Each structure stands twice: as C-alpha cells, then as structure tokens.
Amino acid sequence: DQQVKQNSPSLSVQEGRISILNCDYTNSMFDYFLWYKKYPAEGPTFLISISSIKDKNEDGRFTVFLNKSAKHLSLHIVPSQPGDSAVYFCAARASGSARQLTFGSGTQLTVLP
Amino acid sequence: GAGVSQSPSNKVTEKGKDVELRCDPISGHTALYWYRQSLGQGLEFLIYFQGNSAPDKSGLPSDRFSAERTGGSVSTLTIQRTQQEDSAVYLCASRGAGSFDQPQHFGDGTRLSIL
C-alpha cells in the first residue's frame, strides 16, 4: 500500500511558467514532508521541506504548500528554468520518528526552452 | 568532498555471488540510512543506524541482506547469494544530530546489476 503517491509520472512546462508538482499521502502520522530533486546517475538532492505546523514554506523560486485536511502537498516552481528538468520526489516522515522517509514514485519534470 | 560518498558507483556481478557496498557519510552525521531504488520506483527504505543504538533493520527484504556501521562512521551493505531481483540503485543517506527536522543528504548511489 503506497502511503505517499505522486500520481503524475511526468510533467512538461514552458520556461518561465509555473511548475506545480503534486503529492498525496494517506498516513495521518506524517508530520514532516520534503521534496528532493534527482538528476540521472546522481543521488537525490534536498530541495525544500515543511513541517505539519505550517501550511506554506518558501525558498526562492520554490514554494511548498501543505493541506493537512486533504492530505495533500504541492511544490510550486516559478519561474521554471530548463535546469529544473529532473525527477522530483515527495517524501514524508512519521511524527516523533528520526527514522526512514517514505517516498513517492517521482514525477519527471521537463522544462521546455 | 563534504558530501556522502558511495563506492563502487557501478557493480555488475553474477547471480549467486556476494556483493559489498560502501558508504562514507558526511563527517559528524550520526544517522545513516540505506535505501534502494528499483527501475521506475520510488526509494525503498532498507536499514537505519543512529549512533550506538541497535539498527532498525525493518526494511531489509530478506536475510541475505545485512549491514554494518563501524566506529559510527563508514557503513557497508552486504548482499549474499545475489538474485536478479536485487538489481537496483542502492542509496545511502546521512543526517546530522539535533532536531529531527533535518533533511537526509544522499550519496550518488551504487548501481547494482545482477546477471
């Protein structure tokens, strides 16, 4: 049973426009959420995170929104750049745990010049 | 370098052989994790080390898999009698001490191919 779901395996966006990547989760014990970006043949790189006590966290062009009632989070990238083309993974961690992250299956973002 | 280092970057071996994968975490990081990513899938948790505590092995798929962490630093993941379904990218991550709200930092992984 997938506890973290990324239902869109791929997304294409024009350069300069907004990219919106979505993630849904089922485990109500998750309280810390992260987005990672992954280029081919490299490990995932941490991008941005959000704690469940917040509904928004912003870092430059990247903003993560959390809707706890809907068990949904999204990553907004604006403006999108060709270098943003990568696989984006959503991950979640259960409350009070220092243990493992549960990952979604990823969304391949392609930003077209 | 300052990041998580994994070796080898690629490993091809025959079914039935044993393999050993190595991870050097970021200096000073007390938590170390192993994950694997099969083709087209997300990352799957394998094992977690925190300081001198007993590791959390709940993600290991079978008793052919084992891991050690010596001196609280370097870790090795060993797969005995490899099977074709073990083919995947094996990723190591480490996390600093202090607040739990710190991200894990990943190495570039070892791509394991079982023939």
Image: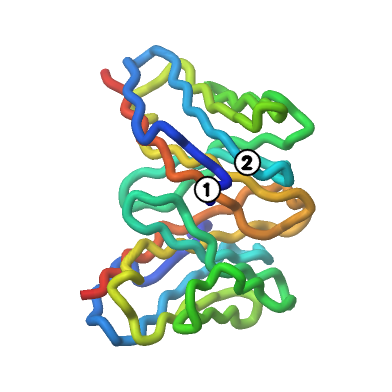
Query: Dot 2, crowdedness within 10 Å: few (<14), some or many (≥20)?
Result: some
B8 vs B15: above or below: above
B12 vs B9: above or below: below
Looking at the picture, how far across and down is residue B79, in whole percent?
A: 41, 80
The residue closer to the viewer here, A5 or A99, is A5
Could you tell me which secondary element the residue under label 1 belongs to? loop
Whether tag 1 and tag 2 are in contact, CB under 8 A, the answer is yes
Asked which quadrant contains residue A47, the reply is top right
Asked which quadrant contains residue A98, the reply is bottom right
Residue position marked by numbered label 1 in the rendering: A2
Q: Amino acid at mark 2?
A: Thr
Q: Quadrant of the C terminus of chain A?
A: top left
Looking at the picture, how far across and down is residue A100, in whole percent?
A: 62, 58
Q: Residue at x 51, y 57 (%)?
A: B3
Q: Mark 1 and mark 2: span between their CA atoms?
A: 8 Å
**Is residue B35 found left or right of B14 in the rendered image?**
right
Q: Say the numbered circle drawn on residue B65.
A: none
Q: Amino acid at mark 1?
A: Gln
First along the sequence among labels 1 and 2: 1
Q: Say the numbered circle drawn on residue A26.
A: 2
Do pointers 1 and 2 mark residues of a single chain?
yes
B110 vs B98: above or below: below
**Is residue A103 found left or right of A53 in the rendered image?**
left
Could you tell me which secondary element the residue under label 2 belongs to? loop
Query: Dot 1, crowdedness within 10 Å: few (<14), some or many (≥20)?
Result: few
Furthest residue in direction left, as rendered: B115
**Is residue B52 found left or right of B69 in the rendered image?**
right
